[in-house]
Structure formats: structure tokens, C-alpha cells
Amino acid sequence: MGIKFLLHAICVWTSTTCWVLTASTDDGLVRVSLKKQPLDLKRLNAARITRVGLESNVNDQGAGVVYLKNYLDTQYYGEIGIGSPSQSFSVVFDTASSNLWVPSSKCLFSIPCHLHSKFRARWSSTYTKIGIPCTINYDYGDVSGFFSLDHVKVGEIIVQDQEFIEITREAFLPFLVAKYDGILGLGFPEISVEQATPLWFSMMQQGHINHKLFSLWLSGDLTSELGGEIVFGGLDWRHFRGGHTYVPVTRSGYWEIVVGDILVESISTGVCKFGCAAILDSGTPLIAGPTQIVDQINSAIGAEGIVSMECKNVASKYGYALWNTLISGVRPEIVCVDVGLCLYNGSQKVSGRLKTLLEDETMEGSAMGESAVCTFCEMIVFWIQVQLKQQKTKDAVFQYVDQLCDDLPNPIGKSFVNCGSLEILPDVTFTIGNKSFPLTPQQYILKVETSYSTVCVSGFVPLDVPPPRGPIWVLGDRFLSAYHTVFDFGNMRVGFAKSAN
């Protein structure tokens, strides 16, 4: 399944060695192509990263914190095979977990299992039953199953007698709609359930790769069929520009490093000036960090909650029309019908617009449905009424409306920006190893298609972990797609170079 190509000889210098990656079918490299699924707003809205205490089934008692995610927003996945003959599965290659699991043929009562490939032990001549039960905790719920042993095909090599989990019960989300079947963890044994050996450890132990490292390239090209590539045992020079900056892994378990100050348009945010922990996570497109910094970043880029954004959108497009309709003497309860944002069926007002109106350009740019637009209209009419009774000027009224829109709660926790302003937004720069790693707006903003338009979502979300383990950053695919990353277990370090997207 791996991509075959001719490699020029290159050297990757360390303090004492030079690795030469040469062209051959037996070059000690294992390549896995990654596919990419598009994000939709429903999935992204449900995506979360949360912090909990150390789970009992995670064996690094010094870790002090486990953060949970729900994979609803996962984009990148690739194919592996399990058993003899090989049974194919699509899996997320996740650097922030360590177990391999796929649905089992014994998963009978969980709907998601029936929508994905299931491992059938009786079809494999190399299968060995272990049977130890286990549960893996996720933000949205648990998955549970039991351990088994079989051969696993990754790229063009076969890892023999690899421990993996056959899942017999899956939480309803996210796997009901996922295009992948399971998860392949690329983290350390310390966070592996039941201390199972991670598959990439087994690759090293069985001599399948010449160097104890793997590298990750995620394509930022939305039009490319190839979503990215993982290379076990080396790196592909075509996927990066310039040399890598290497920093040490500071705590085994997660691929955890130290980041320094985070700057917005060259202005320090302060909190991590003397260093913060950061976990590299290929299983989420988000970048999570301390609320204090994330709020600074989202404020600087003009990001706001979708409720506030849509409220302001309605006020901006229809505010003066609502004002003029009200002062002309139209009854307040039918103002929104009069301007075409709500329906009136003759006896009662209905939230929504006729199909012909839905297709009208006035709805362009809305990330929410027509019923929400009607609701915002009604709220704004009420606010204008209150201000008119107090004989406020038009400018004062709309300043009041704007402030009330700002104060509306943001229940889904995501922040949205104006897609038309990306060219003027500031860079956000992470300091790693005393070097700057800037992210442009095109790199830290996620563009998501909706039924009505394209919306732009800030890739920064809050995650608060108290000292001594915190503050902590989680650098997901918004960062990893900008920088080709080398996970070097042999030297316990991670390297970053500008990605060749």
C-alpha cells in the first residue's frame, strides 16, 4: 500500500551520526499514505478536548493528567491489515494514544460496529486469543473489548504477534459517522492500556526499521487526494524544506515537549514565556491551550462564538430595515415577517423562510438555519423596542444591540471569524527550541462547509491544566500540517521543519 518512489541520498545530521536514506525496495522505511475526510460544522461543533485526572488503566503514575478527546473532528486516516490473510481496516494514526483497536465480529449490539469493518478471528490462521477485558475512556463515552494477538500489516511489512484490542462495545458517537474503523496509537507504552506494546515499538523490536523514529507529513492542500504520509524508520525529503529543529521529549508517555512564548503579531502573550508543556497530537485538528492565551489570540483575530456572530450578522444586514419598519408603525410581532426573515401562515408566525427566500442571496454567509435567523430577528426587534421607549438615538440603539450580541453565551465553545478577513489577520507564533514557528491565518483557521455557506473557525480552543503539570498545550493538525515532524525515539527528541505543502 505504501507509495513507491526513488529517493535521492540525503543526510540527516545529528551530533554524532549521518543517516543516508537510499532508494530500494528494502530501505528500512515503511510508508503509509493517509486519506483526509472533510470537516463539517456538526462534527466540529461536537469536538472537544477535555482534561481529567489520571485514569486507572493508564500506567504512567507520574503523568498526573490525561486529556480526553472524541475524534469527531479527526480528518486523517490510513489503511492497515490484521490477520492471515490480511483483513483491511482504516485507522487514525494518533500520536496521543498508544493502543491499536478495531471493531470485533463479536460487537453485536453497538450500531457503529455494523457500519464498519470488523475483525473476524476465525478467518485468520495466525490469530491467538488473549481475552483480557479492557475499557478505553474517551470524552464522549467508553469503548470496551478484549485483547487479541495477530499479525499486522503496515505499508509493505508485517509485524508478527502484535497485541491489539477487539472492540465489542462502542459509544454511539463519533464512530457512527466516521470513515475510519479504529485507532492506531503512536504514543509510548506508559499510556498504553494494560501495558500493551505499541505497534511502532514492535516494528523496532522485530527489526523492520533501521532507525528508531517515524515522521509525519500532513498535506495542507485541500484539493489533493493524498492527505499525508507517515514514514516509519526515516523521513522523506520531499515533504519538508530546510533542516529540522530538534527539542527533547521532556516526559515519556505522550510526545511531550516544552514550548516557549506564544506571540500574536510579534506581541508576547506572556503566560508561557518561561516554558509550558506541549503534547503533539495527530488525532485532532485543534490547537488547545490555556484559556488566558487562547482568549488573547481569539480576540486578536476577531473570533467570537457562533451565536454572537450570527446575531451580529442579522443586526448588520437587517438592523436598519427593522428600525425603519418599527418606526413606520408596523406591529412589532410581524416586523420580522415583513422583512422576510420569518413566515406567517395566516394564524401564527413560523420560524423559517420559504424555499424561494432560502435561495435568495440575503441568506448567503449564514452558518445557521433559517429558524435561528428568525429567532435573532425577534430578539433584535425586542431590544430596539426597549431602546425606542427610552428615546435613544439610532446609533446608541445599535451599539446596545451589538453589545447584547457580544454577551450571548457560546454553548459549543468554538470561535468563528469572518472568512473575508483572513488576509489581514495576524500570524500566531510558537517559540520552540529558541526558534520561531509561525502559523499564518490560512494555517490556523479551519474552513468548514455548511448548507448555506463556508464558515471559518478558529483552530484555537481552551484547555486549562493547573500546576504542576500545567499549563499545557495540545498541538494538533493545525500545527502539524504546517511543520513536518520527526518523532525520534532513539534520541528521545522531536524535530520540526517547514512542511512542503
Image (spheres, rainbow, N blue to C red):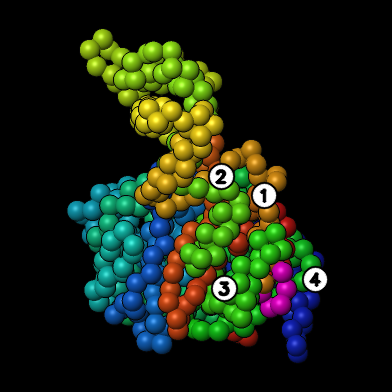
Q: In the picture, residue 126 is in which quadrant?
A: bottom left
Q: Earlier in the sequence, mark 1 or mark 4?
A: 4
Mark 3 vs mark 1: which is more N-terminal?
A: 3
The answer to whether one can see residue 317 in this image is: yes
Q: Secondary structure at mark 3?
A: loop
Which residue type does callout 3 highlight? Val
Magenta residues, start to end: 432-436
Q: Is residue 109 left or right of residue 291?
A: left
Q: Nearer the viewer, mark 1 or mark 4?
A: 1
> Residue at the location (53% across, 39% down)?
455
Residue at horizontal 33%, vertical 76%?
A: 53
Give residue 323's position: percent from left, percent from top: 46, 22
Q: Is residue 377 above or below residue 194?
A: above
Provide the residue designation for mark 1: 425
Q: Does the residue at mark 2 contact the one at mark 1 (Cβ under 8 Å)?
A: yes
Element under disc 1: loop
Provide the secondary structure element on which disc 4 rests. Answer: loop
Q: Is residue 434 magenta?
A: yes
Q: Please give the residue where the numbered disc 2 appears in the rendered image.
A: 417
Distance of mark 4 from mark 3, alpha carbons? 43 Å
Q: Earlier in the sequence, mark 4 or mark 3?
A: 4
Mark before the other along the chain sequence, 2 or 1: 2
Q: Position of residue 60 (x, y in %)?
A: 39, 85
Is label 3 in contact with label 1 (beta carbons under 8 Å)? no
Residue 52's disc is none
Q: Amino acid at mark 2?
A: Val
Residue 271 is tagged as: 3
Q: Residue at x 68, y 78 (%)?
A: 433
Q: Quadrant of the C terminus?
A: bottom right
Q: Amino acid under label 4?
A: Ala
**Residue annotated with mark 4:** 9
